[in-house]
Structure formats: structure tokens, C-alpha cells
Amino acid sequence: MSTTPSSPSPVTPSTAPRTVLITGTSSGIGLAAAVAAARAGWRTVATLRDTSRADALRQAAAEAGVELDIRQLDVTDEASVTAAVDGVLADYGRLDAVVNNAGAGHLGTLENDTMEDIRKVMEVNFFGVLTVSKAALPHLRATGGRLITVTSVGGVVGQPFNEVYCAAKFAVEGYMESLAPVARTLGVSVSVVEPGAVATEFVNNLGVDLGAAIDAGPYTAALHSYIDRTTKQFLDGSAQTPAGAAEAVMEALHSDRPAFRIQTTDWARSFVGTKLTDVDGSAVQDLTTAWVA
């Protein structure tokens, strides 16, 4: 049975810095966003599933001359999420923004993936986002805060061999697009940030040796065509840096009226635009079919 959520007391204005909680900060966009937020004056709670992997985060903070509050948070563990959010409120008394960045890549196709593979990707990339957002929303209501989720251009355009990853990102975008006007009635801004190719992340997050001969059964030829095309985009120097992508997160944090959907590059805007004007789906199918031909 549903119950009406209680309303926390509004936070009394003060000179204390605003507090942001960011998930998935061990590397990539999350790490860059944590450092950028701290540099911009936010009290930054940088979370990651395994705090033993925080060395790069600490080094980046030291090099930037900023302080981070590094804490454990596993988005797939509701108790871990609750403990992290409650800890922030206990220590700082407020939560002004959340950046859902934690995620996991996956390379595969339906016939070859196990249902366990599919559920794991959905658990991190979709249900994990909702778990964090649900825990944070009462406190964001109290501060008129911001809920920001890093999705992907893959949250708009379905891409070969990224079926479950795109499905999870589509789901996040649909959920947040639906939630945004509801949250706005209570003063909470909801945005999604859509990166394109970001240097290092694609290869590092897949758990696949792209240089090895991969046997995908009847899909092997198509997979190798996709890998050849995609590794060039990610590894030839044309991919965006994590710091560049994090600038879009800062836009969502600081803009007076942030857009719901924020792409991180002109290429990402063009790519997403292909889908958003593709009424019958033919433009996207023609584009992505060429990747596996």
C-alpha cells in the first residue's frame, strides 16, 4: 500500500556551502565532476562502490587543491544508499544536489547474453539510479535542489551490441522525463546529461579485450565490424575528455533554469537530433546498420 512521503523541514538559509552527492567517482566523468564541483565551491560527497579504488580520485583532488568527502555507496544495495544519504544529512544538515553517475557498460546481443547479464546491467544503470534518487528526493525538496543523471547518447539512440545498456539508459531517460514536471511542482529540477564518446570509458567499462578474437557465433562478423568502427571513435583521440563531459554536469548544477536534456558536445547534439526528428525510425536504422555491415 502506498503512503504519502513525509516532508522534511525546509533548510534554513545559511552561509554554509551547498552539498552535492555524486555516485561513481572512481574514474571518468564522476571523478572529473567531483573535482569540478569542489573547485566551484560545492561541498562534494564523492561516492564509489569500492573505496579501495579511490586513489585516482584523491590524487586528482590533491592536484586541484580541493577537498572531497569520499564515502562508500553501492547503488545496487538499498541499505548502502540509505546509509550514505543519511550520513550526509547527519554531517551537513542538507543535500542540495545529486549526480547519478555510477553505471556499467556491456557489450553483447540478446541471443548470446544470459538473463543474468541483462538483469545486472539493468540493476546498476536503471534501478540503482532510482534507488539513489528516491532516497535523496525528500532532502532535495527541502532545499529546492537538483537531481542530475548522467545517461548517454545511448539513452536516445539504440546502438548495435549495446542492447541492454541502451535499454537501461532509455529507461532512465523515460523515467526522468516523466518525473521532471512532477518534481518541478515541489521545486526540484531534474536533468539528464548525455555524453557521446568519452576517452577511456568505453574500453575500461566493458570487461572485454577488444584486441582479442571474439567468437560471437553467427554474430561474429557483425560484432567485429562494430568493434572496428567504435574503437576508432573511442581510441583515435576524437573522443571527449571526462573533464569536458563534466562541464555539462556543472551546467546542470549552476544554470538558473537548466534544460532537461543536456548533451556534452556538438557531435552528441547532432547524433541525438537524428533520433528526435526520425519519426519512422529509418534514419537511425540506416545509420546504425552501416556500423555492422
Image (spheres, grey):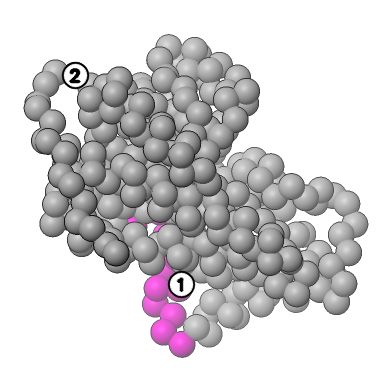
Q: Indicate yes or no whether the magenta region holds residue 268.
A: yes
Left or right: residue 182 versus residue 101 is left
Q: Indicate yes or no whether the magenta region holds residue 257.
A: no
User: Is residue 239 in sight in this rendering?
Assistant: no
Image location (x, y in percent) of residue 145: 22, 41
User: Is residue 89 in sight in this rendering?
Assistant: yes
At horizontal 20% and vertical 61% (from top left) the residue drawn is 182
At horizontal 23% and vertical 29% (from top left) the residue drawn is 94
At horizontal 66% and vertical 69% (from top left) the residue drawn is 160
Residue pointed to by mark 2: 16
Say what amino acid the circle numbered 2 marks: Ala
Image location (x, y in percent) of residue 287: 59, 75
User: Alpha-carbon neighbours of circle 1 within 10 Å: few (<14), some, or many (≥20)?
Assistant: some
Please give the range of residues in magenta: 261-280
Q: Which dot, 2 or 1, sits closer to the camera?
A: 2
Question: Quick one: SS at disc 2?
Answer: loop
Residue pointed to by mark 1: 274
Question: Quick one: SS at disc 1?
Answer: helix
Left or right: residue 101 versus residue 229 is left
Image location (x, y in percent) of residue 84: 41, 31
Alpha carbon of mark 2 to alpha carbon of mark 1: how far?
44 Å
